[in-house]
Amino acid sequence: MTIRLEAPPAAASAGRPGGGVALVGAGPGDPELLTVKALRLIRAADVLLADNLVSPEILRLAGPQTRLVRVGKTGHGPSWRQADINALIVQHALLGRRVVRLKGGDPSIFGRAGEEIEACRAAGVPVEIVPGITSAQGAAASLTLSLTHRDHARRVQFVTAHDRDGVVPADLSWTDLADPAVTTVVYMPRRTLADLAHRALEAGLDPATPAVAVVSATRPDERIVRGCIADIAERLALEGGEGPAIVLIGRAMACDEADLLKGARERAAAPVAATAGRAR
Ligand code: SAH
């Protein structure tokens, strides 16, 4: 997609007071999960550059003066190139505008924030981060589960299921993924979850380890698909519907002690078809 940028006037290219950029986390979807600071900046923005992941309810919070530009990189429409997004952010800020770059979840988690910060710095534009609730936290809250657990999860790791070529990243640590005392949260799992799960099993992860997919976490169309590491990819494909999905893996993701000891093992043994339909 070619993005046409307005040429900044010569006087503005030196930078005008007032212009600046905030990389703002919009959270996983529920507008009530915005921070107070995010809400204030969204209302005051001159320009709002928003991801596809930002929910319509949140976009409606923008003020009447705000110019909204959707700069999504996913979905069925044309995709924006990161270089064009960087250029647009900088250009508006150099024109003295308050730019809010609104991102789903937290800007610093799988959000290309580093590249946008670099572009701002290179252009001498002030830039700040306003953190948001990442989808892992939104999903755990929807499940009423703790990501850490004194008995079951000493640490939490966030991993992406695909690299820039769309395959499972070659440099994921499989030893860490097979750790029985970790909660692993897999972002962008849709295309490669089966491969990721297969490799974690090969690395020694117990096939009965609970795994839960949360689709459209904290949104009205939220969907929860429960399984174990051995079958979650198949279940997500069968029962996951549309929308952004995240997968939480680990002993702490069993709904309760009984599920941990019994349910997950039953599911590991049973074919998916036998239990399909029991999505929640
Ligand atoms: N910065 C975002 C992540 C961006 S990467 C954050 O902190 O959450 C995009 C991935 O985030 C999606 O593929 C999906 O795995 C996850 N994601 C974002 N919003 C989600 C939601 N509401 N429900 C489930 N997963 C979500």
Image (cartoon, rainbow, N blue to C red):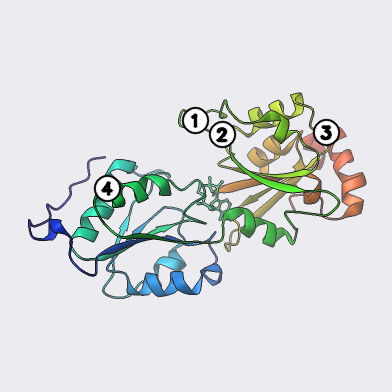
Please count the marks in the image.
Answer: 4
Q: Position of residue 183 (x, y in %)?
A: 73, 46
Q: Secondary structure at mark 3?
A: loop
User: Of the residues under marks 4 and 2, which one precedes in the sequence?
Assistant: 4
Does ligand 1 reach within 8 Å of label 1's beta carbon? no
- Kind of residue at badge 3: Asp
Q: Secondary structure at mark 4?
A: helix
**Residue of label 4:** 122
Pointer 2 local density, CA inside 10 Å: few below 14, some 14–19, many at least 20: some
Question: In this view of the protein, can residue 228 be seen by the observer?
Answer: yes
Identify the residue at image location x=24%, y=60%: 93
Pointer 1 local density, CA inside 10 Å: few below 14, some 14–19, many at least 20: few
Does ligand 1 reach within 8 Å of label 4's beta carbon? no
User: Of the residues under marks 1 and 3, which one precedes in the sequence?
Assistant: 1
Q: Residue furthest left?
A: 10
**Residue 145, quarter of picture:** bottom right
- Kind of residue at badge 2: Arg
**Residue of label 2:** 191
